[in-house]
């Protein structure tokens, strides 16, 4: 039995959209009922009916051709860039591991280890170098250890596709990057105001935003912490938030080498966005599916604790 990507209803005879690849129930099988991204591209996007003889065939009225008309790359659902639609979760996972490989494999071959000045310059967001604007983004994909990136990857792999299918790849990309950047800046900005030094790497701020969205849409969603401790999602999220608040209150912003304020900033963004979606009538599915792909077998996942010196 499959589950509708739009409303979460279980369907014995699901429909798979030929344009976006999603699985839908009878009520949402039509493209216009599930806001199919291919709707806007159904007017001969590949120029099938272009005669190639007279420009007026696909340029009625002699209108000025736009940049999109001139670009010889099909960026629609069937083009080479169509892969990124509904797959941004996996794109971000790939970027995380590529960045990690640069930090710990490639640069060390040339004598620049993960703690070298070059690696820090490229990937670490620091309170004393906050004007290095590229690190606002690169620090989101950089990580401090194998355990750190593995834990963040697990959470993103299981929870990311659910949110991406719900809000669309464009909004998911904005959510991930915005929450990740704001979380890092919140940590180093607060440290700067307090006259403290702070340096952060990691996608945990963006991960907490994703958890925040799901917590609002379906707080009773059952997950397995560390793959064997069952609990509702709201309790898991509350536990993370309580730990961060408690540690900050007792030991300060960077206690334990973990950017707890970044966690809270990302969670706040996710909760706010989730509430917006909830008011618009959105809801999350009642169970997780392995890998987040349409029609995949069920399989809950759970995040691990953050590691030292990162978030």
Image (cartoon, helix red, strand yellow):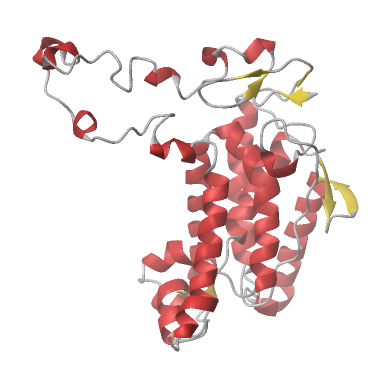
In x, y percent, where is residue 134?
Answer: 37, 66
Identify whether 261 is placed above or below 3.
below
Q: Is residue 6 left or right of residue 231?
A: left
In x, y percent, where is residue 58?
Answer: 20, 15
Q: Is residue 95 left or right of residue 53?
A: right
Residue 297 visible, this angle: yes
Identify whether 288 is placed above or below 49.
below
Residue shown at 79% from the left, 32% from the top: 286
Residue 193 visible, this angle: no
* Residue 17: quarter of image: top right
Residue shown at 36% from the left, 34% from the top: 75
For this orientation, the residue located farthest to the right is 229
For this orientation, the residue located farthest to the bottom is 111
Residue shown at 30% from the left, 17% from the top: 48
* Residue 82: quarter of image: top left
Q: Quadrant of the N terminus?
A: top right
Identify whether 196 is placed above or below 273.
below
In x, y percent, where is residue 230?
Answer: 90, 49
Q: How many marks?
A: 0
* Residue 54: quarter of image: top left
Q: Which of 260 and 44 lies nearest the eye of the viewer?
A: 44
Residue shown at 76% from the left, 25% from the top: 2
Identify whether 98 is placed above or below 112.
above
Q: Quadrant of the C terminus?
A: bottom right
In x, y percent, where is residue 187?
Answer: 55, 68
Q: Is residue 134 left or right of residue 149?
A: left
Q: Is residue 82 left or right of residue 298?
A: left
């Amino acid at each position: 039995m499959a589950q509708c990507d739009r409303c979460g209803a279980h369907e014995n005879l699901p429909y798979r959209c030929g344009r976006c690849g999603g699985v839908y129930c009878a009520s949402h099988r039509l493209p216009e009922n599930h806001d199919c991204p291919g709707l806007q591209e159904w007017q001969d996007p590949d120029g099938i009916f272009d005669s190639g003889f007279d420009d007026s065939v696909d340029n009625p009225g002699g209108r000025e051709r736009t940049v999109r008309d001139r670009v010889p790359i099909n960026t629609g659902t069937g083009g080479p860039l169509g892969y990124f639609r509904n797959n941004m979760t996996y794109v971000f996972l790939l970027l995380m591991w590529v960045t990690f490989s640069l930090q710990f494999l490639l640069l060390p071959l040339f004598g620049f280890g993960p703690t070298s000045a070059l690696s820090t310059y490229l990937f670490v967001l620091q309170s004393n170098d906050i004007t290095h604007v590229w690190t606002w983004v690169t620090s989101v994909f950089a990580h401090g250890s194998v355990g750190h990136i593995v834990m963040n990857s697990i959470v993103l792999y299981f929870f990311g596709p659910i949110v991406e299918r719900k809000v669309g790849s464009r909004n998911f990309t904005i959510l991930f990057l915005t929450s990740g950047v704001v979380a890092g800046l919140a940590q180093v900005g607060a440290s700067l105001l307090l006259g403290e030094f702070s340096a952060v790497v990691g996608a945990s701020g963006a991960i907490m935003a994703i958890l925040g969205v799901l917590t609002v849409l379906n707080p009773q969603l059952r997950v397995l912490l560390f793959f064997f401790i069952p609990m509702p999602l709201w309790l898991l999220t509350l536990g993370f938030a309580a730990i961060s608040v408690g540690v900050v209150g007792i030991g300060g912003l960077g206690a334990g080498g973990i950017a707890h304020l970044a966690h809270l900033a990302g969670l706040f963004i996710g909760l706010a966005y989730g509430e917006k979606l909830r008011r618009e009538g959105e809801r999350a599915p009642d169970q997780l599916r392995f890998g987040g792909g349409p029609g995949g077998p069920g399989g809950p996942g759970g995040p691990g604790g953050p590691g030292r010196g990162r978030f």
